[in-house]
Amino acid sequence: MIAAWKTAGDFTEAPTRPTAPSPRRAPSGPIYNSEKPRPRYLMNVTLIPVTPFQQNCTLLVCDATRRAAVVDPGGDIDRIAGEIERQGVTLEKIFLTHGHLDHCGGAGALAAKYHVPIEGPHPDDAFWIDQLQAQSARFGFPEPEPFSPDRWLGDGDTVSFGNVTLEVFHCPGHTPGHVVFFSKDERLASVGDVLFAGSIGRTDFPRGNHADLIASLRNKLWPLGDDVTFIPGHGPVSTFGQERQTNPYVADSVLARSAV
């Protein structure tokens, strides 16, 4: 299933060969609070689960310009391209949170198909991107098209498409070069595999670091606000506030006990 919603509206879920989608509220509630001033530019968000790992590739569309960015095209390029064509938008850029196969395995092919640049992740993940072919062979994935990002990203950078600008936060831990994309206006973050609804990213991969992951969450993400809705690399969306209350790994109460 392809899940889609406007960040200022309701969540909908539609089949790949859709009839009219039936609106329903997102699991975490509507992303936009109607009591707040309406943002000048709305951003459509479509989750496209890809690869056998069901990674949340995300199509972001600037409503004002109908220009788009794809976050973490891990594979299933025909499915991603089909959604781009179905919505009738112009792909402008590809953004990568980190260098694991299920998040960037299709980036080279998608960039070549649409002649667009790839931005991200942080250069500390270059060693993962250099191993894409080996990662693919290990997991039985199709051989990926090699690529090198057109732009590496660092903490404090911004990326943009259409009239939308996203802030970049370097959040190491799951991988050393992991980045998170944040829309301050929409209160929306694309966090890759740093955080999940009810869990956190693994840190037992090469150059993973649990202490770094916890520091990324506490010092980079939590200060953005409890109301921020985040799109994880796998599974359902949630909010930072919900995870701070109930996540068995990083809830405030859990971290307080671990600090004692």
Image: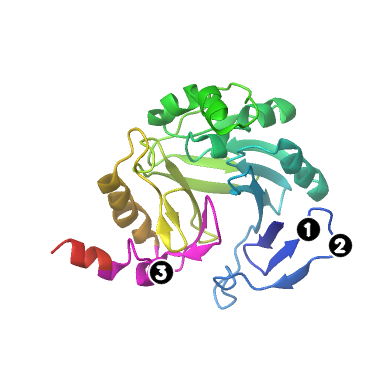
Is residue 59 in view from this perspective? no
Q: Quadrant of the N terminus?
A: bottom right
Query: Horizontal placement of 112 versus 173: left or right?
Result: right
Dot 1 amino acid type = Pro
3D distance between C-alphas at marks 3 and 1:
30 Å
Label 2 or label 3, whichever comes before in sequence order: 2
* Residue topped by disc 3: 241
3D distance between C-alphas at marks 1 and 2:
8 Å
Label 3 or label 1, whichever comes before in sequence order: 1
Query: Residue 19, labelled with which disc?
Result: 2
- The relative height of residue 18 versus residue 9 in the rendered view (above or below) is above
> What residue lies at 64% left-to-right and 57% top-to-bottom?
41
> What residue lies at 69% left-to-right and 59% top-to-bottom?
4
> What residue lies at 63% left-to-right and 24% top-to-bottom?
143
Query: Residue 244, labelled with which disc?
Result: none
Which residues lie in the magenta part? 225-253
Residues at circles 1 and 2 in contact by the CB criterion of under 8 Å: yes
- The relative height of residue 23 versus residue 206 in the rendered view (above or below) is below
Task: Provide residue 33's location: percent of width, then percent of height.
Answer: 56, 74
Query: Horizontal placement of 247 versus 218: left or right?
Result: right
Q: Considering the numbered disc 2 on the image, is that residue within a helix, a strand or a loop?
A: loop
- Circle 2 Cα neighbour tier, 10 Å, few/some/many (<14 / 14–19 / ≥20): few
* Residue topped by disc 1: 15
Q: Considering the numbered disc 3 on the image, is that residue within a helix, a strand or a loop?
A: helix
Dot 3 amino acid type = Gly
